[in-house]
Image (cartoon, rainbow, N blue to C red):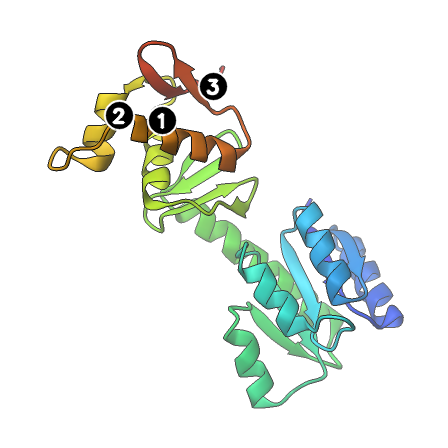
Amino acid sequence: MKKILIVEDEPDIQELICVYLRDAGYETATAGDGVEALSLFQAQRFDLVLLDVCLPKIDGFGVCEMIRRQSQVPVVMLTALDEEADQLRGFGLDIDDYVTKPFSMPVLLEKIRVILRRNKGAAERADCLCYRDLVVNPDTREALLEGQPLELTTREFELLRLFVASPGRVFTREMLLSRIWGYDSYVDERVVDSHIKNLRHKLKRDYIETVRGVGYRAAKEAG
């Protein structure tokens, strides 16, 4: 079931949207101000955010900017601000749609359906590597853990891509140095250990195993 975060400070509108979305088969969570919205977004995983612009504490533009620093989750802005400048500011933050109030709930539901379908289709078309709850996209050089982007250095990304592309295969430090760093520059093998340590810290998972006396691998998944 897709989960949608509704950020709206007007209780009547918030409740109306909740009822329609739940009747349409979506799970919902609600926030009445920008601070609460960001707190919920950090704590839970959402498939789409419905975001009012005129919010207490932090306005919708500020909320969207902070969301975009860590996620490409679809965002639909709901607002009474219909000036071109406001719309351009929203799209400049990579929102997916800008809906002005008053709006039609059936039309809003259709917009949500189309956006979620489009995102699913894009994910399916991408030539991604999947490992447990990791998705690594070599083309866009993005890595997602439980749907949230990982901030990786170039070396960390290449190491992760190499491991998840061949689960169970053991890579010696020499192999990793030659593939990631190349033969044309001298790098101490301890640099590999340092990068693996940093990568493990960012993953917060024991996905990269140490094979004592040999090297590293991503454990082959059962089944």
Amino acid type of the residue tagged 1 in the rendering: Asp
Position above or below: 21 against 186: below
Q: Amino acid at mark 3?
A: Glu
Q: Are the residues at dot 2 and dot 1 in contact (C-beta closer than 8 Å)?
A: yes
Question: What percent of the width, then of the height, locates residue 93?
Answer: 53, 71
Q: Which residue is mark 3?
A: 221
SS category of the residue bearing label 2: loop
Numbered circles on residues, count: 3
Specify few, some or many for label 1: CA neighbours under 10 Å numbering under 14, 14-19, or 20 or more: some
Snapshot quadrant of residue 156:
top left
Q: Mark 2 to mark 1: distance in Å? A: 7 Å
Q: Position of residue 56 (x, y in %)?
A: 78, 73
Q: Closest to the observer: 38 or 96?
A: 38
Which quadrant of the structure image shows residue 10? bottom right
Q: Give whichever of 189, 65 is nearer the camera.
A: 189
Q: Which mark is residue 24?
A: none
Q: Please state which amino acid type lies under the numbered disc 2.
A: Glu
Give the mark, 2 or 3, whose residue is nearer the N terminus: 2
x and y, in percent, of residue 11 in the image: 88, 69
Q: Which mark is residue 189?
A: 2
Q: Is residue 58 above or below residue 84?
A: above
On screen, residue 137 versus residue 101, left or right, reads: left
Q: Which residue is mark 1?
A: 193
